[in-house]
Amino acid sequence: MGFQVLLFVLLTGSAVNSYYQAKPTRCLFPCEFRENIPIVNELSSIWFINSQSFGTYTNLSRPIGEQTSTSECIMRQGPFFILREFGLYFCFKFMALTDTDWVEYFSAGSETLLPFCEMCDGSKFSGPGYFSARNQPLMRDRSRPIGCNLPSICPKRNNKQVCCPNSEPFDSGRNCRVQTSTGSYRYNRPQRYGKPSPHGYSGYRKFGG
C-alpha cells in the first residue's frame, strides 16, 4: 500500500511538471486586475497592468534607480500565480476581499523558475499583504488566514499542506474591457532612500492607455 501511494505521488508530480513545461511561458492577468489599474500595494508600491501578460511594478521603498520593474505573469492555477519581478520569481496566492481589494500570501523570491508545486507550496508562504485599486487607505483586516495553501493539481506531501478545491476564483484574463482613460494617481511614499520620509503624499504617476 505504501509503495502504491509513493508511486501515485511520483506520477502525479511528474504529470504536473510535464504539463507546465509544455505550457507557454506566460499566463494572463485576470480582467478584474487589469480593469482596476493602478493597484496600490500596502501604500508603498504601485502595480500597473499594461497588457494581458505584462505590467509595471514600482516599489517606492527601493533605492532610486531600482524602483521599477516589469511584472510578468508566468504561470497560474486557481488562486496561485507565479510572477517575475526585479529578476526574481515569486508565487502568490491572491484572494478577493471586495471588487477592488485583495489579500495576498507570497513565497520567497527565487532566481530560477522552480517547479510549480515547489514554488507554490503555501505552507511556506509569508503574509498577508493587502492591495487595492482605490485611491484611499487599504483595508487592514490582518486576521485573514491563508486558508487552503496548496494548488489542487499538486500532490500533498505533509500535514501542513491543505489542498485547494479544483476551481478558478478569477477570470481567465481574456476579453477584458479595454482601458481607454488617462489620469493621475496620487501615491503615498512612506520611505525615501531607505529612511522614513517626512512627507506624506509626494507625487503623481500617470496611467491609462
Image (tube, rainbow, N blue to C red):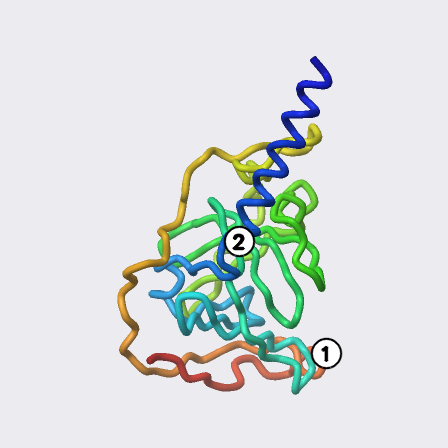
Q: Residue at x 45, y 73 (%)?
A: 48
Taking the image as shown, residue 46 lies to the left or right of residue 176, namely: right
Q: Position of residue 14 (x, y in %)?
A: 63, 38
Numbered tag placed on residue 81 in the rendering = 2
Per the image, label 2 sits on a secondary structure element best described as: strand
Amino acid type at circle 2 is Phe
Quadrant showing the N terminus: top right
- Residue 149, image x and y in percent? 59, 39
- The amino acid on which the numbered mark 1 sits, given as a three-letter code, is Gly
> In the rendered image of this protein, does residue 208 appear above or below residue 103?
below
User: Is 77 placed above or below 5 here?
Assistant: below
Few, some or many residues within 10 Å of mark 1 (<14, 14–19, 20+): few
Q: State the residue in front, 51 or 160.
A: 51
x 42%, y 60%: residue: 28
The label shown at residue 194 is 1
Earlier residue among tags 2 and 1: 2
* Rendered-image quadrant of the C terminus: bottom left
- Tag in front: 2 or 1: 2
Residue at left offset 58%, top offset 71%: 44
Residue 104 in percent (x, y) is at 55, 53
Q: Position of residue 26 (x, y in %)?
A: 49, 61
Front residue of 98 and 140: 98
SS under mark 1 = loop
